[in-house]
Image: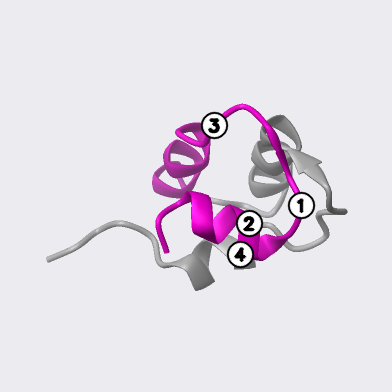
Amino acid sequence: MNDTPSPIEVQKHLSGVDYPATKDELLRAAEVNGADDDIIDLLDGLDDRTYESPADVSEELGS
């Protein structure tokens, strides 16, 4: 069974993000939106760069 959060779950916790956004901004938004540790850990593994859109984040996560 795969316990990795789905792209939809991740994006749900990134609501309200104004893109472009940095990795740190994504992490803060996820925390504010009540993301669990699995989602925080997944986002923490992103490259430290600016993301242009939700699709950019999903692509980086391998979705």
Sequence-wise first label, 4 or 2: 4
Q: Which residue position holds label 2?
A: 56
Secondary element under disc 1, as helix, strand or loop, is loop
For this rendering, which residue is in front, 1 or 21? 21
Residue 47 falls within the magenta-colored stretch: yes
Specify the farthest residue to the left: 1
Residues at discs 1 and 2 in contact (Cβ within 8 Å) = yes
Mark 3: amino acid? Asp
* 20 w.r.t. 41: above or below: below
Residue 29 falls within the magenta-colored stretch: no
**Which residue is found at the position 83% from the left and 60% from the top?**
16
CA gap, disc 4 and disc 2: 11 Å
Per the rendered image, the range of residues in magenta is 36-63
Q: Could you say where residue 19 lies in the image, as x and y percent from the top left?
A: 84, 53
Mark 4: amino acid? Gln
Q: Which mark, residue 47? A: 3
Residue 43 visible in image: yes
Q: Nearer the viewer, mark 1 or mark 4?
A: 1
CA gap, disc 1 and disc 3: 13 Å
Quarter of the picture holding the C terminus: bottom left
Q: Nearer the viewer, mark 4 or mark 2?
A: 2
Secondary element under disc 4, as helix, strand or loop, is helix
- Using residue 16 as the reference point, say whether residue 8 is left or right of it: left
For this rendering, which residue is in front, 58 or 5? 58
Secondary element under disc 3, as helix, strand or loop, is loop
- Using residue 52 as the reference point, say whether residue 44 is left or right of it: left
CA gap, disc 3 and disc 2: 12 Å
Q: Which mark, residue 52? A: 1
Mark 1: amino acid? Glu
